[in-house]
Amino acid sequence: MTTENTPASPFRCGTVAIVGRPNVGKSTLLNHILGLKLSITSRKAQTTRHRLLGIHTTDDTQYLFVDTPGFQQKHVNALNRSLNKTVTQVLAEVDVVLFVIEPMHLGEADRLVLNMLPRNKPVLLVVNKADLMGDKGNLLPLIQDFDLEFPFTAIVPVSAKKNLYLDELLQAVRQHLPEQEAIYGEDELTDKNERFLAAELLREKAFRFLGDEVPYSIAVEIEKFEMEGNLRRIHAAFIVDKESQKPMLIGKGGAKLKQISTEARQDMENLFGGKVWLETWVKVKGGWADDERALKSLGY
Ligand SMILES: Nc1nc2c(ncn2[C@@H]2O[C@H](COP(=O)(O)OP(=O)(O)OP(=O)(O)O)[C@@H](O)[C@H]2O)c(=O)[nH]1
């Protein structure tokens, strides 16, 4: 795996978590690091303790990006408590943490995430959306304020969307990964199964197309996932907390649900590399976000 002319640098492999308040660009960053080639491999024995979102392998490094279930600040219920606990646990166990901020909109929500960062391991401050920073001088004091509040290992400006400085970021991460052989094969990009990814894509679209309030109490249940040749037949239910949330998700004449489903289906087809037949509907399960047992049955 090493090139012929350069002395072999030791191979490094380790886990990386990406955290930050909603909308700072975490998903974009991960997708662009993975080169938008997120592909699926069959479910296999996990070699890391956490769910992997993606694997990026270069000549000398394997980066294992782990999932940190969305840190939620608005509503306090069983779901949020369970999610926030998971975030802290994951952060305590990974090799490197990337704390992503958007410098134009630094605020209380970022600070809440900052307070959860582990102090005993490398945390890199990733200043995303560098392409939008007009006069950088104005932002420096804000970033420096943050730097004073936490002993960041490095500050790396990037633009996830424009693919700027992503190599620099990966180099900075590499230095903090343990020297060890690759855990996964080079061509394996994620070990999540398609069923899970289908649910995530639907949930992501619901978040995108709905306002702020409803999505936090939406879950997705894949009721059926069948292969017919290269066609995937997927039946999915959105689970909402209250009857009143149902029309918001369905929209006038079903328009909203159709929009969400069409976009999710297109993403699934790109991701899975084959046609998808998708049927979606909305179910009300009262108080699901408050019910620990219901959460377990939905996989939280
Ligand atoms: N201009 C610019 N926009 C970006 C950049 N990175 C991400 N965005 C945009 O920021 C928005 C949010 O990006 P996401 O990747 O969904 O953010 P996220 O942090 O994963 O959001 P949550 O899933 O809500 O936690 C999208 O509209 C992106 O296109 C960047 O480098 N520059």
Image (tube, rainbow, N blue to C red):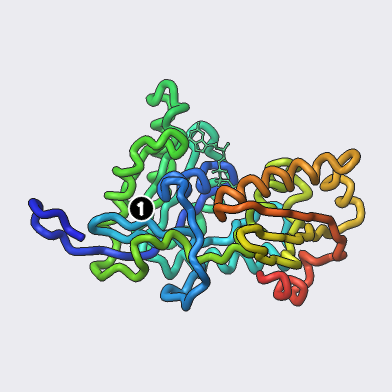
Left/right of residue 61 with respect to residue 197 in the rendered view: left
Left/right of residue 36 with respect to residue 184 in the rendered view: right
Residue at position x 74%, y 47% in the image = 261
Left/right of residue 62 with respect to residue 33 in the rendered view: left
In terms of depth relative to the viewer, which is nearer, 261 or 95?
261
Quarter of the rendering occupied by the N terminus: bottom left
Residue 75 rendering spot, x and y as whole percentages: 73, 56
Residue 228 rendering spot, x and y as whole percentages: 67, 63
Tell me the element at label 1: loop
Q: Is residue 25 above or below residue 61?
A: above
Left/right of residue 275 with respect to residue 142 in the rendered view: right
Residue at position x 41%, y 21% in the image = 135
Residue at position x 72%, y 54% in the image = 277
Neighbourhood count class around disc 1 (C-alpha, 10 Å): few under 14, some 14–19, many 20 upward: some
In terms of depth relative to the viewer, which is nearer, 119 or 57?
57
Quarter of the image where ligand 1 sits: top right
Residue 209 rendering spot, x and y as whole percentages: 73, 41
Quarter of the rendering occupied by the C terminus: bottom right
Task: Please give the residue where the numbered disc 1 appears in the rendered image.
Answer: 151
In terms of depth relative to the viewer, which is nearer, 127 or 36?
36
Residue at position x 52%, y 62% in the image = 67
Tally of marks: 1
Residue 282 rendering spot, x and y as whole percentages: 84, 56
The answer to whether the beta carbon of the residue marked 1 is less than 8 Å from any atom of ligand 1 is no
In terms of depth relative to the viewer, which is nearer, 118 or 230?
230
The residue under label 1 is which amino acid type?
A: Pro
The extreme top residue here reads 135
